[in-house]
Image (tube, grey):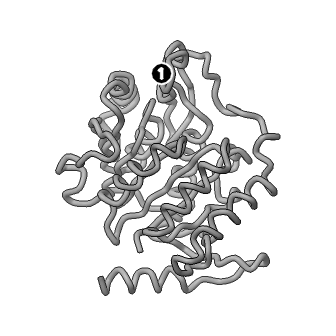
Amino acid sequence: MAAASAALMEVLEGEDDDDGEMVVGLGSYGGKVRLLGGGGGCDEEGEAAAAETMLLWGLQQPTLAQPNAFVSQSSLALAIEACGRSLSILQSPSSLSTPGVTGSVMWDSGIVLGKFLEHAVDSGMLLLQGKKVVELGSGCGLVGCISALLGAQVILTDLPVRLRLLRKNVETNLKHEEMRGSAVVKELTWGDDPDRDLIEPLPDYVLGSDVIYSEGAVEDLMETLLQLSGIQTTIILAGELRNDSILEYFLDAVMKYFVVGRVDEAQFHPDYRSRRVAMYVLVKK
């Protein structure tokens, strides 16, 4: 507990930016983030979550930005350059007609997060080489594939019905003998007890894109984040700004257990920035 407290104190020794928000390095991410709530106590969490959603919708005006700017969901594959390689991420557009099935195609937040990781590593703001990474809701697998190419030991997870396409994309794009990292695919249902290899040892990073999509999923997601996180774990989540009330609900819940900071869009990959996408770094209190 003392180690956790020391880590939190280190996090909170930041600077104020021009808007009076705390700006700090958070967890293993060496860039700066805008700390939500200034690291205050429980009484501030609801107000901080509401203020954050109002700020995002007021300043970024996500509904005015182009949706799916980086992907065509009607295509059978997404071609993208990453880590010096040409990746081909297979999609299943016909699955979108099935209610509740969204992981069969790529979304902008996954592309933004994947390219952010590449840019952050190239900029020296993030080190993934040799680190254990668990990706939640991997979908088509782009984020996990990029993480493996950056040297991480990646476990890509999703629901059982999503694993076939995920495995195919991992096998197709990570078959290079000289690859720096590794990748395996495993089933994980949020809220269930994770397999031992997911938590022993606890991951250095937990990644997720578009994992905040309904209030009903927040409780299970929170339980899984807590199960996967130690004081050394850095969580990076990206999501499209679709529903302010759902984001506020999640932030209010997560700030009870985690210090949360938003990554400024200026730190995204310069070619992959979108006002529709927000990205957060979390570390356990």
Is residue 247 at all visible to an observer of this figure?
yes
Q: Could you say which quadrant of the image residue 179 lies in?
A: top left
Residue to which mark 1 is pinned: 90
Looking at numbered disc 1 in the image, what kind of residue is underneath it?
A: Leu
Q: Is residue 226 above or below residue 84?
A: below
**What is the count of numbered marks?**
1
Foreground residue among 18 and 228: 228
Q: Position of residue 206 (x, y in %)?
A: 39, 54
128 horizontally vs 243: left or right: left
215 horizontally vs 16: left or right: left
Quarter of the picture containing the C terminus is bottom left
Q: Which residue is most to the top?
A: 94
Q: Secondary structure at mark 1?
A: strand
Graded by Cα atoms within 10 Å as few (under 14), some (14 to 19) or many (20 or more), the crowding at tag 1 reads many
Q: Position of residue 27 (x, y in %)?
A: 45, 70
Q: Position of residue 139 (x, y in %)?
A: 44, 32
Is residue 88 at all visible to an observer of this figure?
no
Foreground residue among 218 and 260: 218
Foreground residue among 15 and 171: 15
Q: Position of residue 82 (x, y in %)?
A: 53, 39
Q: Could you say which quadrant of the image residue 72 lies in?
A: top right
> Residue at 73% across / 78% down in the picture?
17
> Residue at 40% across / 69% down in the picture?
284
Quarter of the picture containing the N terminus is bottom left
Q: Is residue 111 above or below residue 234?
A: above
Q: Is residue 13 above or below residue 139?
A: below
